[in-house]
Image: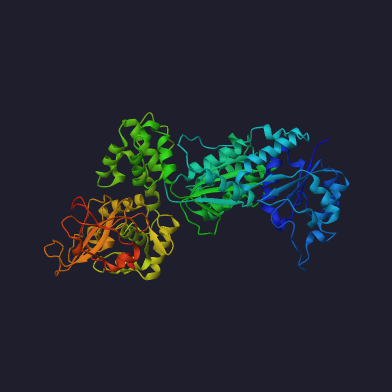
Amino acid sequence: MNKRIFISYRRSDSLDTTRALAERLKATFGIESIFLDESTIDPGQQWPTTIRKALSGATVVLVVIGPSWLRASDENGQRRLDNESDWVRCEIQTALKDQKTIIPILIKNTNIPPSEEIPEPLRAFLNYQCYFLYDNVWEGQLENLITILESTYGFVRSAISNTPSPQNIPRSDVKFVGREKEIGELDKQLMRNNQELVAITGMGGLGKTELAIQYALKYYEEKIYLGGVCWLKATRASDLKQQMIDFAKTKMNLDVPEEYKTEKSEQTEEKKLETDKIFAQWFWQRFRLQQNPLVLVILDDVTNYPQVKNYLPPVSSHFKVLMTTRLNFKGYIPELPLEVLQEDAAVNLLRQWIDDDKIDSQTEQAKRLCNYLGKLPLALNLVAKYVRDQNITLEKMLIQLQNKQSILTDEALGVDTNDPTMTLDIDRGVAAAFELSWELLTDIAKQLAILLSLLPFTLYEWRFVEEKISALTSVPWQLVQAQSNEVRKARNQLEQLNLLQGENRYQLHSLIREFFRLKLVKYERGDQVKGIIGMVDLDPNKAILPANFSRLPTVNDFVGYPGCYVACYSHTKEGSQYSVGGNIYVMGQIRVEGRYEGRICKPKGYETADISAEPKFKELCAEKLPEVCQDDSCWAGGDTGGFLGL
């Protein structure tokens, strides 16, 4: 006789977790071994009869108890458990009467219910040993529960769970660290939150594809997706149909009907799309005919969601869909936004390429290199491989990058297609990865991006950007002539492609900023814009003043790069090369890392009495004892008017 598990739960209390638990048990012991009312009872079946029959045939009854299980109430405010017709109460009472093995499953840090709060006919179920299944240790505890069901209660893994299912997960040699939390979050969204579709979003170079690969490998090997994993490259929607045909033929040994394989030249685009939609329905139905529990579908690099929509599997508990995309859906589709690595994780990524001894002896240089590269996984992988291949120190690598007019032009951040030792599955360098997003921008969005590359690295309000646009009246750009709603559309496009970060206050990633500056050099009237707005070099020891010196530079022309040092003072000391009308503004040093903190220094040659902190600056940074700068190369004059748009 086949052994079966009956799962009792309260929908308002634990539907998401119970679904995930049921899917895992189905994948391990087979669909027929697990009873969960919402997925097992078919339309038209009598609920009471089906429930009683399932309980009668169950070997083990799992009672899932979450935070609101005990006190859940009906529409009249009465506790459901006190109602003799409550289904959860009836299920437990029947299981006790039939002397079934009961395992209370406690989830979400829920404690064992007090005996005195349980109706007397149910209290005996508290005598059964409970099992804790908490989110932070979900995977290990779930595997242990499966082992208990096997060893203690005689459950046997199904033949299907030991049979390889179709999959075409790409091979990857990219070094992968620092994303364990994100893999767990994907599992939580797709399984325990029961989302049918989740998008991994973020700008180019963050490792979205690699995260999808690692997620697919982990849960395929753990036999969660016994129905298979279908990986589709979605950069061009027109390629999807042929990929699906290839998968059906090579991975599923299916004969694809001729009408789907050939396209008639006289077909209209509308008719072709309709045919593709019918084919997609046929394709996904082949998975369902296999009777395997769960299929993972991955659409990698979605550039246009409406174009791929017709190729998606039907909304069903049978399919989970994971997308990777540079698009930002702003909540319209469930998302997992990917950020740059934390500093420790970035250094650990370097260790995957470079000997520990080399990293340990150059810890500060390693951290500086990671921050200089914006902690972007693509850049870190490429540069770390370069350091290893060239056998150079991290300090030398830093100097090499800093000596470039643009960091993105260094060969370390590119891909050498002639390198016979290239094991990384990376077909483009950092600049080329950003180019994919650049090509999608409108002219106004491109001009806005170039302007933003000249502004501070720190967060700024949008009105500060609008002020800068208004200063460009002499520049014949569409951006300058555009209405405010057109500028907002351009900003939205940058946000949708994850090129601009923030909501009420904005900033660019340091390497995106460098990429846009490369475009500035070649863009029509770029030099004129630079002359009006001014710019700052990434190197804090270089202060680049506006080419057009008809005005004093502002703090905004200098502040905000990683490692940049800036502070403001005003006094009336004569003789400065930056003096205008006897009023001099001097920038000393202060480290800026997202907010204003550090020490205020006075430039060499100035007395403390000559300098007083600018009031607006004092609001953002408490003044400490001044310290003398070592030289004059790190400061320049500036006016604090409009400080950071405040």
Q: Residue furthest right?
A: 97
The image shows residue 323 at horizontal and vertical percentages of 53, 48
Compared to residue 479, the image places residue 258 above or below, namely: above
Numbered-mark total: 0
Tell me if I can see residue 242 in this picture: no
Q: Residue furthest top?
A: 420
Quadrant that contains the C terminus? bottom left
Quadrant of the rendered structure where residue 67 is? bottom right
Side of 69 where 537 appears, left or right: left
**Residue shown at the point (33%, 67%) measured from the top left:** 645
Quadrant of the rendered structure where residue 531 is? bottom left
Tell me if I can see residue 128 in this picture: yes
Camera-side residue: 209 or 260? 209
The image shows residue 375 at horizontal and vertical percentages of 39, 46
The image shows residue 423 at horizontal and vertical percentages of 42, 32
**Residue shown at the point (72%, 34%) measured from the top left:** 157
Compared to residue 463, the image places residue 117 above or below, namely: above
